[in-house]
Amino acid sequence: MDKIISVKNLKTYFYANNRCNKALNGVSMDIKRGKTLCIVGESGCGKSVTASSIMQLLPKFSRIEEGEIIYHDENGRDIKIHELERNSKEMRQLRGKDIAMIFQDPMTALNPVYTIGWQIVEMIRTHEKISKKEAKERALKLLKDMGIPLAEKRIDQYPHEFSGGMRQRAMIAMAMSCNPKVLIADEPTTALDVTIQAQIFELMDKLKREYNTAIMLITHDMGVVCELADDVAVMYMGNIIESGSAKEVLENPSHPYTKALLKSIPVLGKGADQEINPIRGATPDPFDRPTGCQFAPRCDYYCKECDEQMPEEQLINESTHMVRCIKYKEVVLNG
Amino acid sequence: MDFLSPKKRLYKKFDKIKEREENKTFKESKNRSIKKLFSNKLTTVGLVIFTVILLACICAPLLTKYDPLAVDMKNILKPPSSDHILGTDKIGRDIFSRILYGGRLSILIGFGSALGCSFIGVILGCYSGYKGGILDAILVRISEIFMSFPQLILVLMLVSIIGQSASNIVIIFIICGWGSVFRMARSQILSIREEEYVQSLKVFGLNDFIICYKHMLPNIIGPIAVNITLSTAMFILEEAALSFLGLGVPLEIATWGNILNASQDLFTLQNNWWMWLPVGIVISLFVMSINFVGDGLRDSTDPTSVE
Amino acid sequence: SSTGNEGQSEQGGTTKAAENTLYTNGGPEEFFEAPWLNPGTFVYNKVLYDRLIFADENLDPIPGEGQLAKSYEMSEDGLNLKFTLRENVFWHDGEPITPQDIKWSIEYSLKTTVINNVFANTFKAIEGATEYLDGKADDISGITIDGNNIDIKFEKLAPDALLTFTQFAPLPEKHLKDVDPVQFQQSEFFRNPIGSGPFKVEEVKMGNYTTLAGFDKYWDGAPTYKMHLNPSAGDSDPNLVTNAKGGLLDYSYTKNIADVKSLDGVEGINVDKVDVRYTRLFFANKFKKKDGSEAPLADKKVRQAIMYALDMDEILDGIFDGAAEKANSLTPDGVDKVDGLNNYDYDPEKAKKLLEEANWDPNTELDVVYYYDDQQTVDLMSIIQNYLSQVGIKMKFRLVEGDLATLLWSLPEDPVNGPSAVDFDLCYGATAALSMHEYYDRYQTGAALNSHTPGTEELDKLIEATNKTIDAQEQREAFFNLQKYENEELFVLPLYYQPIYVITSDKIQGMPEKLGNPQFNYKWDIHKWTLAE
Amino acid sequence: MFKYTLKKILGMIPMLFIITFIIYFLLDLTPGDSVSHLMDPEALARLSTEQLNALREAYGLNDGFVVRYFKWLGQLLQGNFGYSSTSGVPVIQIIKETLPATLELSGAALLISTVLGSILGVIGAIKRGSIGDNVLTVAGMIGVSIPQFFFGMVAILIFALNLGWLPVGGRTAPGVVNFMDRIEYLILPALVLGLSLTAGVMRYARTSMLNTMNKEYIKTARSKGIPEWKVNLVHGFRVSLTPVIVLVGFRLPTLIAGSVVIESIFQWPGVGNVFNTAIRSANYNLVMVVALMFVAMVLIASTLVDILTAILDPRVKLEG
Amino acid sequence: MDKEVLLTLNGVKNYFPVKDGALSKAKNYVKAVNDVNLKIYKGETLGLVGESGCGKTTLGKTILQLYKATDGEIIYNFEDGERDLTKLKKDEMDLARKKIQIVFQDPHSSLNPSFTIYQSLSDPLKKFGVKSKEERRKIIGDLLEAVNMRREYMDRYPHEFSGGQRQRIGIARALSINPELVICDEAVSALDVSIQAQVLNLLKDLKEKHNLTYIFITHDLSVVEYISDRIAVMYLGKIVELADAKSLYKNTLHPYTKALLSAIPVADINHKKERIVLEGDVPSPMNPPSGCFFHPRCKHCMDICKSEAPQMKSYTVEGKEHFVSCHLASKQIEEGGLYEEAGTI
Ligand SMILES: Nc1ncnc2c1ncn2[C@@H]1O[C@H](COP(=O)(O)OP(=O)(O)OP(=O)(O)O)[C@@H](O)[C@H]1O
Ligand SMILES: Nc1ncnc2c1ncn2[C@@H]1O[C@H](COP(=O)(O)OP(=O)(O)OP(=O)(O)O)[C@@H](O)[C@H]1O
Ligand SMILES: [Mg+2]
Ligand SMILES: [Mg+2]
């Protein structure tokens, strides 16, 4: 079995301000052992909510309505995450130990009043019964592994004494401290400079190789996908509209949205001569979602049937390449 | 009252919201702030109490036929009756009418002081925050000096200097209170000073005053309004406290503080409840209602607040 | 005196009163007030110091044996006074009290700023006092010491001489002789004074409490109990009621009727009314105004109209619950007052008529000032304003603060024709008198404090007559004449007499039958009291 | 840390200097002088001009304002705080006698309001939206809306007079020596003052805690799998503590003002009472020194808060 | 040179004092812009790239006189001759303000939330002489149409618009007084990719239509390459390389530019390249390294780099002017004779 987490028809709704926001409306995907799954999509499409749902870290005014999230543990057991209470013991044991997470902004994701070392030790000692000293030694080793210079000194410093890149390394060190099977990274480099981003990606690549950790990488940068992904899932307005291996999806984009997205970004090296085409219109209001295919109002292939319902998942050519568009054949043909 | 677990109760609420959403039956109000303001029950209650008391004070002549100053030695310390709804005081004045007319002055003192403080504080704070530099540094220092006095101490000293009268009290409250508004306005302006629309006005080379007072000020009106309401409440309480120490508005003038002050002695406290209880309740209620409204205003103007 | 209140038992507080201790108030807050200005306002001044001679509850000197004086003698003409000091009297530090202490006290007191007016007048009448005050002499030649005797020779008649020595407390020269008389009150001595009375200071917690213990060398036997003094000003103790209800008050007095009412029905507390020489009044300014215009109150008809316009009975009933009495003269009712004075009973019609006769301009607004910052005064002002408006007199009233001596009592440069050096038309105030002379002497032409009454020969003569004799009956006759004149002319507008209420608990045993004015010294034998458990 | 503290303290000095001037100037403007308040106006009016002058001279009132100010300041700098002009008692002694009382009362009130306020605030924030939270919110509102003295009077009426549980006022009595005996005197005033301040602290603590709980690092903490109570206390409360402490520091002026009122109701022999009487009797020296002391207390408190914040929050720079 | 120079920067520096209190003296300086020399030609788009904190925004704001330059000249070529903006008097400055405008990054804070679009845009117009209200409404309407929005939108409030729309309004505002030079500070960075393209294309169109000159500030090399004629690369307050867009990519001279280019993930699955990962972080501009600011992170660091700051030199590479300030590049060029030297800037 190469899947480690499978998500089926996940629906997560938000209930803030007396309104219901159907942030996730039937998301299905699989994370494979030792592979990187990239989730791309524009802001607000539900990438982070997917991650939070898996970790059961949703805010109070939200609920998983339907669907299942299953963690396939090493012993072949299936843990039904969606049935666990948010802060139950089982869920807490999964968190950090089996599934770890790093966040977008390392500035705010570390508690400012505790030292880096303290925060890593806390993580280790939550899941393993070892002495403080041992835990600290392990933390030190982790920091060294993550390429933090002068780790002996750094371990007793506070987050604000670290630079952005360092903090993200420290975050990763913390996430990796209990050897998780899955690492969920929610836009881990958006707040960082490109040169630092390159460092972080290098590190993540190394981890994947050395520890066989599955990575779910959330991003909105197609470039990142091209460079790092084994598998890709493209999200739009709370649905995964296309997924598959990176090669499949990027070489043969089969959903009008994926295709348009790829055409709308300038590619380095092509210079001023390349043509970029914006996607028409704007992302719909999350409270006023289209009834059928979410992309229909902006789609070049729009037809009446698109308004009826969100298209079913379809596999292209019996492969792993999934698409949710009734006209995907036409799209592929035009591509 | 249902006895569901908190989680179940929450989920029941969710179901209701979802149903409404699916049937598209929710009411969408145009101004989210106002909607939010009224969705807060406490604020609504506060607003109602506030309006009732305020209107009653303003319309005092319509509600009572008694002159608050009319001494009636034949009707002294009468308990509430149909003649005098809330009874009479030690020299036969109608308490209901005194509460209403006294409220006018108390509210005026509170509101006037709050408004005065805000006016000075905002004018200085906006410009100081926007301009920065030496002027700012000096003003901040001055405000620090004013604020490092415990307010009541400064008020007591000032009262003994310029004497007791309603307008003096207002002046004193303004002298003592502008500092905090100044600080608030300044920090608010500082927080939007680097906003790009301000920068763009600078790029156009617009006059500092126009940028500061016309373009920036409206964006901090929310917190200022909150501040005005909350300090109105504070000043009403402070006036009462001053009256208690015998340093408030001259005793012959009816204000809530003075009415309460007149019944300080334990005999009255134990035997003539109508002399202190109604007015005590009215002060507390009114102050509370302002606080409710202020709080609601704060929540509704604060974009970071959720729910 | 327990009426109403269903006799609910109110015994606030868990504090148990200490055993065999008399609780009272009027304890020092920052310092012990020197005993020469208000000789009996504070309980501690009455019990810490002995006087030379005793007064009875009417403040008349008791002939024969005195307190510190074994005996005393006044010559016929009133110009020679002789004391013989007891031999067994001691200061609280154990030193004997000597005639020199008495002489020194008299001399020194004249130089301080905190001396009662009656004392000062008496002492100034002593032979050689003027030279002494002018610095021409080191002591007052009229006071001579002979063994245990002190002889005082008066230069001119001192009508209140004996009264003075019933109230004047000698102080130990040893402890005070180096103190600058101007700083007398501020001296270290009054942080923990050494007196001569039956009680001596035991423990002082300024602003908190003070305890007094019996002085075992007291000539008449030491008291058997201790005294606990809570702080606060003499006759207006805001905590009186709470303390009394809490069982922490055995002896006190108050003028505050609200307090009295609150104490009504409190178990174990007795309240007794005592008539005293305390008159509330309006000082009426009759001098021309500074701008030369005539004073609104210059015409006596206007003053009379005001008296007629006020229904004092109803007012006093209302705010004092009948506890104060309507006044028709500065002098309170009693043996010292002439019969048949006009009572100025409430008669608004007459008031209006008088105003008409006086051509009263209804637009004139009287400027009324007061200096008590309590609620009752304000209420009274409001009531008076109300009554006056009914006869067509407008008035505004205001609290005066600051330098009252200047604001209220500045003398006009010309004490007969003015113009006035002060601003008010009417000033609500009080006169508390130790001696009858205190009531009237201040209205003499150019007398200190006479900021408001232009001098007239007739008035001067009438006042003069009261000071010409020490014979009680002659004095009384002179006062009668003066009172008649006063009643007609109304150079002040007397409003009411305020009694004092003496509050005692059932614990006290051996109180005198007849209570005197608690603010002065009279023979009350406090050292012989006992406390019940 | 030492350098930081020193710098903060040095920074206070010019401030205090300006403030002394302001206070002195203000007092000079009050109608009347200490002599006119020292004596009964009638007695004063009887004094001869020479006597009056001698009196004024004795109190140093005949000098010009600036001269008097600098004389006073000079004395102050030499550690001589002057004498109360009504009693002649060294001011320092009055303060020595009354300050412990005030500190005791304020300290107790501060303790009550801080502890109770933070606990309730944090509970409110954690149980946000629950019935308990709503009840606390409303109670807090009522708490800040009732006039302090009204609250005090009613408390006396109920607990001291009607129920007779506690003494009506005062701080001590003969025979009462140790703190435990005195505590019954302290309970009522401290509770009234403390409770009236609690509401403010509670609301602030709640907001602060809510703010913290919205922070990203709380999500991080949860993602680590640590138990919820630990998330709340170790990560949430610990961080929200800093602003609460800052608030408590800033509340000191309110506390002092409150103690003036409360001390007067409960006959508490503290500095507030002293100030209240001193200001009425134009007791220059005393008012000056007490006001200055209050200001210094506020300044010191804010410095302490700064230092405490620096300890609690490593982000605050210590040097520089 | 055939092209007309619009703006010349000579040794522009901008240091921010670091102080701990408003009244105390500064001890340290953040050297945000540290000796920048630059010429901008009429009608071109100059891309300015660099990592966060390298001073791009500061440079832009210094040109706009929002910050006072600590040192150096900013010479603008007015119709009637060149003048140094840093020395202009307040009223003369208005003329310059009419010529230079800016488009900001953040669509959320670029418009006053409590004013309608008309209210926001009307005051600048008033200042620059459009007195009547009708005229202002007409101009603003035209502007909105020029950025592909409807006239009626002028009476709406900012919160009623999406990020892309707001950005377009921001552009309209910048164009409202017909400037010659527009500084776009990260004008598309905050937008979603799908919307980024709209704004980029709009900017391109407007440039043609209004004959504008752009200084295009961004950290996204793909975007800058797409839109710019020439690109300047900044590092720690200095420009390290400046060249024609194409040749910068093809013939990268500076090691920093090389690393930057290689670090950027390319949205092309078939694009395979070697990633150069730079060590360490960007040093603080408060105390930049000695010599060449880049030397601590440079693989090719030589001794001279540690001590001596390289001069910006101009070379002709494949017929295009190419500026670089790097000891290594100079050495290589001299050794290899690849390119010829053409003097300094
Ligand atoms: N805490 C929350 N409360 C209410 N709504 C939320 C919350 N978090 C997310 N949402 C809503 O859920 C939807 C999806 O949000 P999500 O954060 O998953 O987007 P995203 O794809 O991660 O976007 P980004 O790229 O900006 O991070 C949005 O409509 C958002 O408004
Ligand atoms: N007003 C200011 N006061 C003090 N320092 C400043 C100020 N503005 C910018 N700086 C500092 O100057 C340096 C350059 O900042 P600048 O904003 O110009 O960088 P940037 O290249 O625009 O970065 P980004 O890509 O993050 O926008 C930074 O270190 C910054 O901290
Ligand atoms: Mg996200
Ligand atoms: Mg920038």
Image (tube, grey):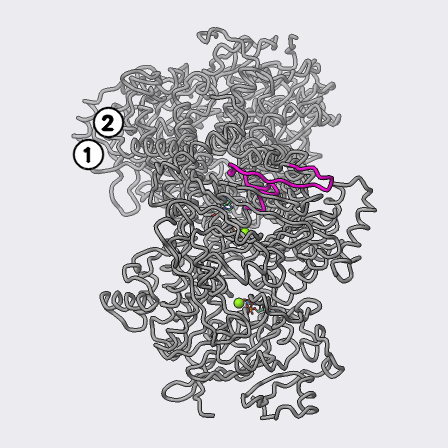
User: Residue C360 has which mark?
Assistant: 1
* Image spot of residue D288 (x, y percent): 57, 46
Q: Give the image quarter of residue E137.
A: bottom left
- The secondary structure type at the circle numbered 2 is helix
In the image: residue E328, left or right of residue C305: right
From this viewpoint, which residue is outermost toward the front? A317
Q: Is residue B8 visible?
A: yes
Place residue E53 in its image quadrant: bottom right
The answer to if A52 sits in the magenta stretch is yes
Q: Is mark 1 within 8 Å of ligand 2?
A: no
Q: Magenta residues, as a range?
A: A50-79
User: Does the CB distance between marks 2 and 1 fall below 8 Å?
Assistant: yes
Pick the residue in front: C389 or E245: E245
In x, y percent, where is residue E198? 41, 65
Residue type at tag 2: Ala
Compare marks 2 and 1 and give the one earlier in the sequence: 2
> Which quarter shows the C terminus of chain C?
top right
Give the x, y percent position of residue D297.
Answer: 62, 45
Relative depth, front residue between B57 and C227 = B57
Q: Residues within 10 Å of mark 1 (few under 14, many from 20)?
A: some
Q: Which residue is mark 2?
A: C305
Answer above or below: position of B78 versus D92: above
Quick one: C289 or E241, which is closer to the camera? E241
**Residue type at mark 1?**
Trp
Asked whether residue A76 is drawn in magenta, I would say: yes
Query: How many neighbours does mark 2 have within 10 angstroms: few (below 14), some (14-19), or many (20 or more)?
Result: many
The disc at residue E171 is: none
